[in-house]
Image (tube, rainbow, N blue to C red):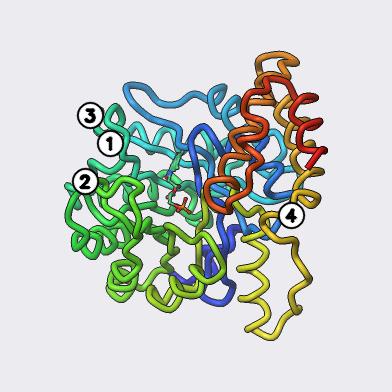
Amino acid sequence: MPTSSLLSGLEVSAGRPAIILAPMEGITDAPMRAMLTEIGGFSHVVSEFLRVSQTVIPKKVFRKEIPECENGFRTGKSVLVQPQLLGGDPSRLAESAREVISLGAPGIDLNFGCPAPTVNRHDGGATLLKYPERLEMIVAAVRAATPSHLPVSAKLRLGWDDPAVVIENAKRAEAGGASWITIHARTKMNGYQPPAYWEWIGKARLGVKIPVVANGDIWRIEDFRKCREISGCEHFMIGRSALADPWLAHRIRNELVDETGGTVAETLPLAVDLKAWLPHLSRFAELSRLFSQKGDDTRYAARRVKQWLRYSEVHHGTNWFTRVKRFETLPEIFASLAEI
Ligand SMILES: Cc1cc2nc3c(=O)[nH]c(=O)nc-3n(C[C@H](O)[C@H](O)[C@H](O)COP(=O)(O)O)c2cc1C
């Protein structure tokens, strides 16, 4: 498949490096997607997984989980949202893909990496890495249900417990017609335990012709450089680090663009610059309230803001979460942060 036909607005092709916001269930919902794409740097974002179990996912569920579908599957900043499906039944996945495509989805991503026991027990996520032929059948069924100008991608972990199976699974995804593969460089048994084994991404990449997106533990620009060197990839997905350092996507993008002779990087705030964070935090609180189906529940928005601050504390040593963790309302949180 020629790389140009992979695009359809989703920027994964040989000539244009992509930086994708990772799907993170319970974190990268519509308000978070809106806020992070306002800060910018991302080529596109992938939705949290939608699980296809006994029935096809109806349109109303897609509308609820991906409210951006009312806006052409774009966040407020016009960044495309690629729905992600998870499940083990090729025909129900294909039917669900048809439903969301009929709402205007720009493509489909398939989840072959979720390590959650309930998901795995019910034949979804990382379990499928043990059955390469089923993985191929699923990709092929969804590919056949999706118009050929729209991409179908597959997001894999390295394997269930053996990282070497990523080579066969990547080939199977390609044989099923995947437009690209994203590889989270850990097995299911590795959970989220560091390190990420980027060398396996490199080995899998050499076995396929389609683009490969590298993912896992790119926390800082130095990690990006190392991951790029080891994996040989030109496309990257970042998840938790987008919360820990909301400007990391820009840092990566600027480095890639700069190298290709484009615009030189603007000066970006440090990950620990609270002054730079504050307007985004308050915007996120506003967006959380706007999107919340719990009415005007500011406590919900407060919980989301605290969840976000926790990432900066764990990974960049700020004390912002510790300061605000006992507060349950937004005014208390913002008053406490304003004193720093
Ligand atoms: C809380 C949480 C939820 C996640 N949910 C999903 C999901 O819905 N779909 C998926 O493919 N991966 C999911 N992931 C995995 C991430 O997309 C990503 O592969 C992983 O976090 C490694 O990337 P990172 O080190 O940049 O965070 C999730 C990860 C976390 C931490």
- Determine which residue is flagged by label 3: 121
- Determine which residue is flagged by label 2: 134
Tell me how far mark 1 sits from mark 2, CA to CA: 8 Å
- Which of discs 2 and 3 lies nearer the camera? The answer is 3
| Element marked by disc 2 | helix
Residue 185: image location, x then y, percent: 34, 59
- Determine which residue is flagged by label 4: 273
Q: Say left or right for 146 vs 30.
A: left
Q: Say left or right for 22 vs 284.
A: left
**Nearest the camera: 135 or 305?**
305
How many numbered badges does the structure rendering display? 4
Q: Amino acid at mark 1?
A: Gly
Q: Is residue 133 visible?
A: no
- Determine which residue is flagged by label 1: 88
Q: Residues within 10 Å of mark 1 (few under 14, many from 20)?
A: many
Tell me how far mark 3 sits from mark 4, CA to CA: 43 Å
Residue 241: image location, x then y, percent: 55, 53
Q: Amino acid at mark 2?
A: Arg
Give the mark nearest the N terminus, 2 or 3.
3
Q: Are marks 1 and 3 in contact (CB under 8 Å)?
A: no
Tell me how far mark 4 sits from mark 2, CA to CA: 47 Å
Q: Does the residue tagged 3 have its C-beta within 8 Å of any atom of ligand 1?
A: no
Q: Residues within 10 Å of mark 4 (few under 14, many from 20)?
A: few
Q: Is residue 121 visible?
A: yes
Give the mark nearest the N terminus, 1 or 2.
1
Q: Are marks 1 and 2 in contact (CB under 8 Å)?
A: yes
Q: Are marks 3 and 4 in contact (CB under 8 Å)?
A: no
Tell me how far mark 2 sits from mark 3, CA to CA: 16 Å
Residue 29: image location, x then y, percent: 59, 35
